[in-house]
Each structure stands twice: as C-alpha cells, then as structure tokens.
C-alpha cells in the first residue's frame, strides 16, 4: 500500500504523492531537478506539503516528465460530512 503525505485543511485534506511517484519510477530528486530545470526548494515543498500556492507550470512540467496526471501528484479529498 502506498503511503502519501496527508495535509489536513478546513474542509478536507490534500494527499501529496510526488515522493511515491519518484520512488515507483526510480527517479531521484536530483534527476527530477536537472531534467525539469526546477529548483530543489520547489520540489521539496511539493513533496512535504508545504505549499502556499501551486504553480501550474511546474505541475505541467512534472506531469510531462513523469508521464502522469496532476491527480497522480496531488489529490484533494473533501470531508465526507459536508452540509
């Protein structure tokens, strides 16, 4: 079973999955940095769920490089008991 970083929010939670995708595809953070020309801190924030805003250009770059969809990197799950 995959382990995702879960970040709780007021109305649900985010699952951050980049670390698992990299592990599954046997790609290091350094390789992702080099091949996508992305700063380490940007990758680290995405892996640790320390985002204030999401850069859709970076997400698109990662999705293209990793041959995946955005939902494979980040998923938002709303609370089930919504009124």
Image (cartoon, rainbow, N blue to C red):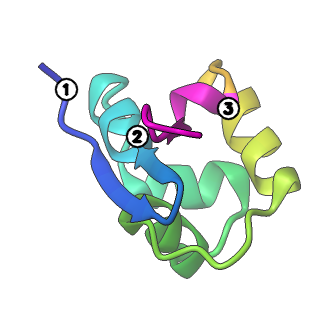
Q: Determine the secondary structure under disc 2.
A: loop
Mark linked to residue 70: 3
Q: Determine the secondary structure under disc 1.
A: loop
Residue 33 occupies quadrant: bottom right
Circles 2 and 3: CB atoms closer than 8 Å: no
Q: Name the residue under label 1.
A: 2
Which stretch appears magenta? Answer: 70-83
Of callouts 1 and 3, which one flags the residue occurring earlier in the amino acid sequence? 1
Disc 1 packing (10 Å; few <14; some 14–19; many ≥20): few
Residue at figure coordinates x 67%, y 32% from the top left: 70
Can residue 74 be seen in this snapshot? no
Horizontally, residue 23 falls left or right of residue 10, namely: left
Circles 1 and 2: CB atoms closer than 8 Å: yes
Of callouts 2 and 3, which one flags the residue occurring earlier in the amino acid sequence? 2
The image position of residue 28, as x and y in percent, is 35, 48
Residue 3 occupies quadrant: top left
Q: Name the residue under label 2.
A: 17
Circles 1 and 3: CB atoms closer than 8 Å: no
The image position of residue 67, as x and y in percent, is 65, 19
Between residues 49 and 65, which one lies in front from this camera angle? Answer: 49
* Callout count: 3
Q: Does the magenta stretch include residue 58?
A: no
Residue 64 occupies quadrant: top right
């Amino acid at each position: 079973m995959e382990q995702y970083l879960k970040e709780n929010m007021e109305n649900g939670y985010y699952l951050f999955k980049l670390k698992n995708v990299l592990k599954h595809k046997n790609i290091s953070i350094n390789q992702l940095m080099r091949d996508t020309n992305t700063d380490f801190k940007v990758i680290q924030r995405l892996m640790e769920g320390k985002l204030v805003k999401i850069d859709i250009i970076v997400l698109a770059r990662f999705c293209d490089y990793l041959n995946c969809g955005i939902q494979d990197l980040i998923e938002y799950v709303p609370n089930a008991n919504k009124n």
